[in-house]
Each structure stands twice: as structure tokens, then as C-alpha cells.
Image (cartoon, rainbow, N blue to C red):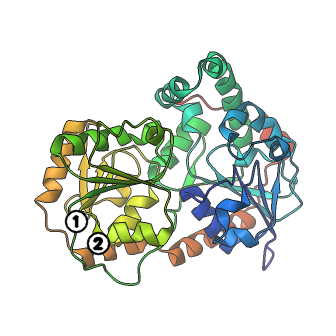
Amino acid sequence: MPDTPSAVLTHHWLVKRRGGERVLEALYRVAPGPIYTLVHDPRGFGASSLARARVHTSFLQHIPGATRRYPMLLPLMPIAARTTRLPDADIVLCSDACLAKAFTAADRSKVICYCHSPMRYAWEPEIEDVYRRSMPPGVRAVWGRTIAYVRAADAQAARRVDLFVANSAHVAKRIQRCYGREATVVHPPVDLPARPTLTPREDFYLCVGQHVPYKRLDLALEACRKRNARLVVIGDGPDIRKLDPRRYPRVTLLGWQDDDTVRGYYRRAKALLFPGEEDFGIVPVEAIAHGCPVIAYGVGGATETVSEGRSGALFTPQTVEAMEAAMDRAADTRFDPSEMWELAQRFSHARFDREMRDVIDAALSSSAVRSPQSRASAAPPARAS
């Protein structure tokens, strides 16, 4: 095993610094090397460590408007990844929620896939249907065939992975269901404050993130409307663009904000509303670390980060009424910001670095190297249901 293994990193697309890109920054710190991605907009990474990285793109980069309309390029992504050959390296470290594991690696490279989640719109019928209904009619007509093709390409790429790492136990189960593979769980790192936040809370709720349909911003909007409560929404996405401000006069839309601004809202908000089923959810951990209770849907990654009565309140089913009941429980609970800060420490950068180095060492020490033939002949997994 080499003292300092050579590394190549891959990521599905680099257009904006969101949760997956923050994890890529941490992977780049653990195993620095060139980064390969389908499309790249450097304007979204000015303050990021990735601004100093050597980033290489696929042929999709040359399509006009690709960095803005990349979701429309989904039918081309499998071939774009497959025809992009990675340089020889000891390890290929994939930061994957789409087809980052589909780039063509050198035969001797150990392929380690840090999986944020298998593509939910490809593997989960209910999420696929939500995305299909959000598409223009012309795209909707061919959506089924497109997704079947992308799902097959994703399954084939999964068979070329030597070792899967999941960002949560919830995602590890999904990897088993979708790809038929075991995964080691390494929770993502979260930027944590140096000390607990003891400032008084103000009378507003907070939502932070990329507001796509499965995040269920609609539940937070309706719960706050019914209670005449103020809601501050940070982030962008199709659900923001469809929002009718006349129906929600007490909602403040701030769009994307820098990290310091978001932290300021964590320090002041009454609670963070997190109504979607998340794979892990960095945002709730950030909020908890700043003493902001989290009211979250009690399925998925939130069950691994939010502790009922200690750092927030969980609700099921995924309805406005259940969410309101959790808001009432949170309002009646005295949360200890020092305890919340302590709870968040298990998601530190130091812990992530240590666990990922252990994963890399284990992969390089293993004598089991998947040959191109064995990768091609592995049995395909069944679709999730």
C-alpha cells in the first residue's frame, strides 16, 4: 500500500456549492487530486477550496447553457461520463448522487463511491412521478424511457465500484435495495461553531435548502399560514418559483445566502422546519449546533441527527397536521443549547477525515480487485419499490 495514495475525484456536476459539494470539499482535503465532473460553473465556488482544484469536464460542458440547464441533459449524462477516461491513480473517489461513479477508471484503480443517495428520481417510483409531473409536456412524454435508460446505466456503473460508503444508515439500506451492495456508513462533516449559541430566539421559523418537490416546502408554508407564523425561507428551486406570495404574506424569501448569513439565522430562529425525507441532511445538524431546534419529518436521515425532546421534534405522517403537532411540542420544550452543541460534535470534520482515511486504507489493503470482466458480469440489482 503506498504511503500517500494517488487519487482522482469525481462528482456529478459542479454548478453551485450545496451539501454534496461541501462533502466533496472534505473528500478533496482527505485525498487531493484532479476532479472530473459532467459540467462545471466556477462562479459558484469562489470561496471554496475547490476553486484551487484542477477540474476537468465532459463534452457536455461545450453545450451552450449547460451549467444552467444541466437537468435537461440527463439523457446524455451516461455516455458523457462513460466516454470520459480518468487518469491512472491508486484510488478513484466518487462523490455521487447521479452518475459520478460512471466515469471510466483505470483497471488498477480502486473505486470508492461516497454515495449521497442512489438517484431517487430513477429508483423510487413516487419520487420519479413527482419529477415527471414537474417537467414540460414534451419532456414528460419521453420521461419514462429516459429514466429506464439512466437507471440501467446507473446500475451498470454501480457494478464497477469496489467499495460503497453511505452518508447515513438510511442511504446504506437504499444502496442495498437498489444495487444489491453493502455500504460502510460515514456521516458527512458539518461546519460547527466553536462554542454553544446562547442568544435569545426570535419569533420566526426557518427553512434552508434547495427547494425541489420532495423537500415538501409546501408543508412548512401551510403550517405557518394556518398559525399566522412568520417563516423565513433561504434557498432557491422550482417550489420557490411557483410560490404565490399573496397566499403567504408572512413568508420572507431570501434566495441563496452566504454561510455567515445562514448561521446568523440559525442563531436567531425559533426553529428550523425540515419537512422532507432526507438522505442525511447537513442543514439540521448545522441548526442544532447553533442551538436552533429542528422540527423534521421522522423518516430518513433526520432520525439519525434529530433527538426528540433534546434537539427538536419529529413528526409522522408527512402531513400539515402532524407537523403542527410537532411545532406545538417544540414550543412546550426547553431546549438546552449547550447540550445541542455537544450532540452535534459527532459530525465534526476531524471525525470524517479519520473515518474516510480508514476506508481508503481498508480498500487499498484489500486483495479483492474487481477485474473489468467481473465488473461487467455482476448480477444487476432490482429496482427499489
User: Which image quarter holds the N terminus?
Assistant: bottom right
Residue farthest to the front, as pictured: 246
On screen, 142 above or below 200?
above
Q: Are marks 1 and 2 in contact (CB under 8 Å)?
A: yes
Residue 208 as seen in the image, left or right of residue 269: right
In the rendered image, the vertical position of residue 358 relative to residue 294, given as above or below: below
Q: Is residue 133 left or right of residue 340?
A: right
Q: Which residue lies most toward the bottom here?
A: 194
Instruction: Give the residue at mark 1.
Output: 310
Percent position of residue 78, x then y: 77, 36
Q: Percent from the top left, x then y, of residue 373?
A: 85, 40
- Seen in the picture, residue 51 relative to 369 is either above or below; the reply is below
Judging depth in this view, the residue of 266 and 241 nearest the camera is: 241
Disc 2 on helix, strand or loop?
helix
Q: Nearer the viewer, residue 19 or 367?
A: 19
Displayed quadrant of residue 244: top left
Q: List the single residue furthest toward the left.
A: 332
Q: Along the horizontal axis of the image, is 214 left or right of 175? A: left
Q: Is residue 3 above or below residue 213?
A: below
Residue 268 visible somewhere in the drawing: yes
Residue drawn 80% across and 43% down? 81
The three-letter code of the residue at mark 2 reads: Met
Please give the residue where the numbered disc 2 appears in the rendered image.
Answer: 340
Residue drawn at point x = 52 percent, y = 63 percent: 188
Q: Residue furthest top?
A: 141
**How many residues crowd around disc 1 within 10 Å: few (fewer than 14), some, or many (20 or more)?**
some
Residue type, mark 1 in image: Arg
